Amino acid sequence: MDEKILDIFKSEENYISGEHLSQVLGVSRTAIWKHIEKLRQEGYDIVAQPNLGYKLIGAPDKLLPAELAWKLGTKIIGCKIFSYEVVDSTMDIAYSLAEGGRGKEGAAEGTCVFSEGQRKGRGRLGRSWNSPKAKGIYLSVILRPEITPSEAAKVTLIAAVSVAKAIREMTPLLALIKWPNDVLINTRKVCGILTDMSAEVNRVKFIILGIGLNVNTQRGDLPKMATSLKEEVKSQVSRIDMTRSILRQLEAHYFLFKKNGFGPIVDEWKDLSAILGRRVKVICRDRRIEGQAQDIDDGGCLVIRQDSGFSERISAGDVTVVR
Ligand code: BT5
């Protein structure tokens, strides 16, 4: 109902009477009044004039369901949106929603969990993710792809391509991808991607895709080699527009993957790669491998050509470009 009321407000520049809203939406005027009060509490600036009605004059700069869903136009990504002020990690909330339990079915594919801030934002291998409030996008998406557990890394690359393209669509910045899960701008990390999985031996039950993007974050709130969109473009960037673009890109690339397989994603990934052809060092569990980043194979593994001429495939690790 909140979304429908906002829809009407956004398509009309003049005041709209409570009576008109109640007729169009088929609920009482008291119900309309209650919804408007709720929207005001969420931060919407709605003025009321006797005899004229209501008018929306400002929306909060928050990743709220009604704002994100407005003219989103996706089929599954964002079909249901949960927004929080502060949580430990959106990953945990999305995971329990996906699991369901107590006779409840798990949440639908495409369900998104956002939080304005995170107390315990997570990276890979127990690392943390700085998540200052109202500055970045902290999102976890529930996906239910029909793949085997060994293919789960593909989802990370799908997300990296989607975020890099969303940044390029919404800003003049040339976002690049550093295998496997970083999006960089001018060699600094602006976005990190994390996937958690629930699986049986041969089948993924669901994947929680976590995306952390520094939008209006100040450098002082970030680790040394990190940046934000605002630091790079030197002006505020709309988190809402940026999020909508990410959700659309994610859906487009996820559908492409489902329809045509991983090949087209790898092709796009290669065009956006910050490391292909470069000399890199990879820390992979307790090993260090150095050589030329030669290729990404059709399973999403990085192929490194060592000085001995031997090529090695790596499925996970941390890459540094050697200058
Ligand atoms: C990642 O891990 O890059 C995955 C980050 C995923 C974060 C999202 S936010 C929504 C969802 N909920 C969560 O709890 N997590 C996901 P990794 O490659 O391990 O990188 C972690 C490292 O990046 C840290 O050790 C820092 O060095 C650096 N780092 C931490 N916070 C950062 C930030 N805000 N921006 C750039 N770099 C950061």
Image (tube, rainbow, N blue to C red):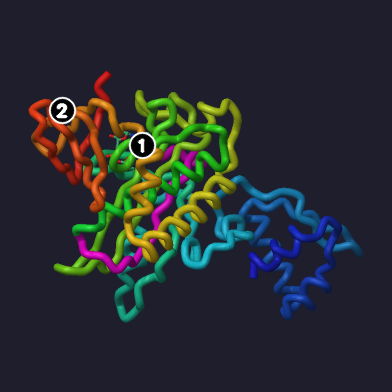
The amino acid type, in three-letter code, at marker 2 is Glu
Q: CA distance from mark 2 to mark 1?
A: 18 Å
Ligand 1 quarter of the rendering: top left
Q: Which mark is residue 290?
A: 2
Front-most of residues 261 and 212: 261
Left or right: 10 as drawn, with respect to 158:
right
Task: From the top left corner, tell me how far across and down residue 121 is, in percent.
Answer: 34, 44
Say which residue label 1 marks: 273
- Give, as a single range, the part of the protein colored magenta: 131-149
Mark 2, secondary structure of its residue: strand
Q: Quadrant of residue 280?
A: top left
Q: Is mark 1 within 8 Å of ligand 1?
A: no
Q: Can you say whether 186 is above or below 72 in the image?
A: above
Residue in view at x 56 percent, y 33 percent: 172
Q: Residues within 10 Å of mark 2 (few under 14, many from 20)?
A: some
Task: From the top left corner, tell me how far across and down residue 241 is, in percent.
Answer: 59, 47
